Image (spheres, rainbow, N blue to C red):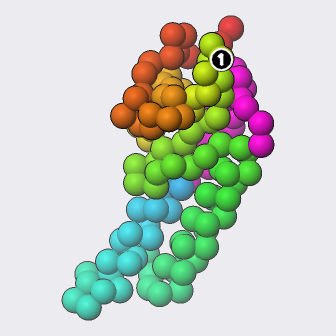
Amino acid sequence: MGLFTVAEAYDELARLRPVLDELVRVRADAAELAASLRPGGRATVLGGLPEWKAAQARLDDLMTTVQHTGAELKGFAPLLVDFPAELDGVDVLLCWLEGDPELGWYHRTDLGFAGRRRLKTAGPPG
């Protein structure tokens, strides 16, 4: 896939928000179901093994949906989504971390999350 502009990444994140919100919900359900299936696990109203398997399948579908946009799902708990881009001639990843209100960060591809910096113009480009 190609590179995103900041505007394209911002728009794609807006389109992905319902998918990401569902991913967070299903992730929590799957964790609760998995815990209930362990020896001595506490029963849950969410169900049992069939529901856990269904949650795992749904998580796979949701993660595939994210990746088909050209975005990279880098973290699962918490969610971390990177959008490959170029800023001032430098390859970067525009990044959104679960809990961020918007796409407002980036880091050089060679630095990773530790090199995360604020975008100069956070918020919808306009």
The quarter of the picture where residue 48 lies is: bottom left
Camera sees residue 102: no
**Quarter of the image that includes the N terminus:** top right
Question: In this picture, is 76 found above or below 69?
Answer: below
Q: Nearer the viewer, residue 93 or 14?
A: 93
Residue 10: x %, y % from top left: 64, 26
Identify residue for label 1: 89
Residue 117: x %, y % from top left: 43, 22
Residue 108: x %, y % from top left: 51, 29
Give the structural element (helix, strand or loop) at label 1: loop
Residue 30: x %, y % from top left: 44, 70
Task: Farthest residue to the bottom: give it.
Answer: 39
Q: Is residue 21 rendered magenta in the image? A: yes
Q: Amino acid at mark 1?
A: Gly
The quarter of the picture where residue 45 lies is: bottom left
Q: Residue at x 41, y 37 (%)?
A: 113
